[in-house]
Image: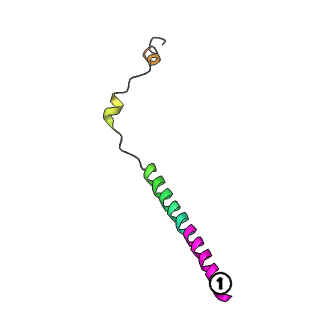
């Protein structure tokens, strides 16, 4: 009877351990992804010079 109880507990321990491993892997990957996405990327100056203004801004000087 004692052997059967320890066998059930061992299976339960494996389930809990598997859950903890999966959860910790999720936390590590989520944190790594958030850190990667929050890093600032270098701004391309060429892209900013190619911005076309909105047509309404072209007429703003006439109203003054």
Q: Circle 1 is placed at which residue position?
A: 4
At 55% from the left and 64% from the top, the residue drawn is 23
Viewer-nearest residue: 29 or 34: 29
SS at mark 1 in the image: helix
Q: Give residue 1's position: percent from left, percent from top.
A: 68, 88
At 37% from the left and 27% from the top, the residue drawn is 51
Applied colour scheme: rainbow
Q: Is residue 52 rendered magenta in the image? A: no
- Highlighted magenta segment, given as a residue range: 1-19
Classify mark 1: residues with Cα within 10 Å, few (<14), some (14-19) or many (20+): few
Residue 10 relative to residue 32: left or right: right
Whether residue 62 is situated above or below residue 16 in the rendered picture: above
Viewer-nearest residue: 4 or 48: 4
Residue 56 relative to residue 51: left or right: right
Q: Give residue 6's position: percent from left, percent from top.
A: 63, 84
Q: Quadrant of residue 13?
A: bottom right
Instruction: Name the outermost residue toward the bottom.
Output: 2
Q: Give residue 57's position: percent from left, percent from top.
A: 45, 18
Whether residue 12 is situated above or below residue 54 in the rendered picture: below
Instruction: Name the outermost residue toward the right.
Output: 1
Viewer-nearest residue: 6 or 22: 6
Residue 12 relative to residue 64: left or right: right
At 36% from the left and 40% from the top, the residue drawn is 43
Viewer-nearest residue: 5 or 36: 5
Q: Quadrant of residue 9?
A: bottom right
Task: Count how many numbered circles sit on residues in the image.
Answer: 1
Q: Main secondary structure of the magenta part?
A: helix
Q: Is residue 9 rendered magenta in the image? A: yes
Whether residue 48 is situated above or below residue 14 in the rendered picture: above
Whether residue 57 is situated above or below residue 29 in the rendered picture: above
């Amino acid at each position: 009877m004692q052997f059967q109880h320890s066998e059930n507990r061992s299976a339960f321990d494996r389930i809990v351990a598997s859950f903890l491993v999966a959860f910790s892997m999720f936390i590590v990957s989520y944190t790594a992804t958030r850190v990667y996405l929050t890093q600032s990327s270098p701004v391309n100056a060429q892209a900013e010079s190619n911005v076309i203004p909105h047509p309404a801004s072209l007429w703003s000087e006439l109203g003054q």
